[in-house]
Image: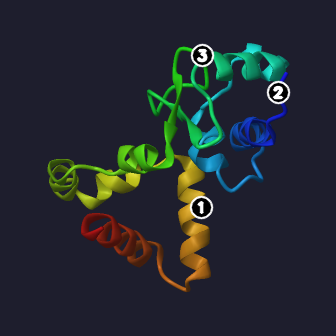
Amino acid sequence: MTNSRKLKQMYSNMKYRCLNPKNPGYPRYGARGIKICQEWLDSYNSFYEWAFKNGYNEVLSIDRIDNDGDYTPENCQFITKEENHRKGKKTISEWNEFKKTPQKQVIFNVTEADHLALKLEATRRKMTMRDFIMYCVRRITNG
């Protein structure tokens, strides 16, 4: 087995995002129900073998093809950071559609964990929840 600290760190980060409620990424992963397949949870070697059979190299990062799906061999691939960044951006038509969404609907579409994270950040910024959400929406729609 080739020594790959970066792959081992990727594996650890994936587990912490999904399993540790104290991890900053947990609201976007574990709290949303994103899981890691049992085969990978049970064995780093299994993840390691899958990674190298599926094009892993140190300049790539793991990506879930279906963003709402779990970390499984069928739903994961390796892509560059640039591809991952582009994948996360919405098209102009998607943002225009988002802008038409009533504010109440946007608020109700966040999970309980997301709501707590928003509330904590609003408090940290000394803003009301409504003002903070509007601030976020403005940043999203103008970004």
Is residue 109 at least partly visible in the picture? no
What quarter of the picture does the N terminus occupy? top right
Q: Is residue 130 visible?
A: yes
Determine the CA span between mark 2 and mark 1: 39 Å
> Is 85 above or below relative to 39?
below
Q: Give the percent coordinates (x, y) of residue 94.
A: 20, 48
Which secondary structure lies at badge 1?
helix
Judge left or right: residue 132 versus residue 36.
left
Q: Earlier in the sequence, mark 3 or mark 2?
A: 2
Mark number displayed over residue 73:
3
Query: Depth check: 73 or 93 in front?
Result: 73
Q: Secondary structure at mark 3?
A: loop
Residue at 61 percent across and 80 percent down: it is: 124
- At 61% from the left and 26% from the top, the residue drawn is 71
Answer with left or right where residue 54 lies relative to residue 46: left
Residue 20's spot in the image, x, y percent? 78, 44
What residue is drawn where x is 30% and y is 67%? 143
Q: Which mark is residue 117?
A: 1
Q: Which label was assigned to residue 2?
A: 2
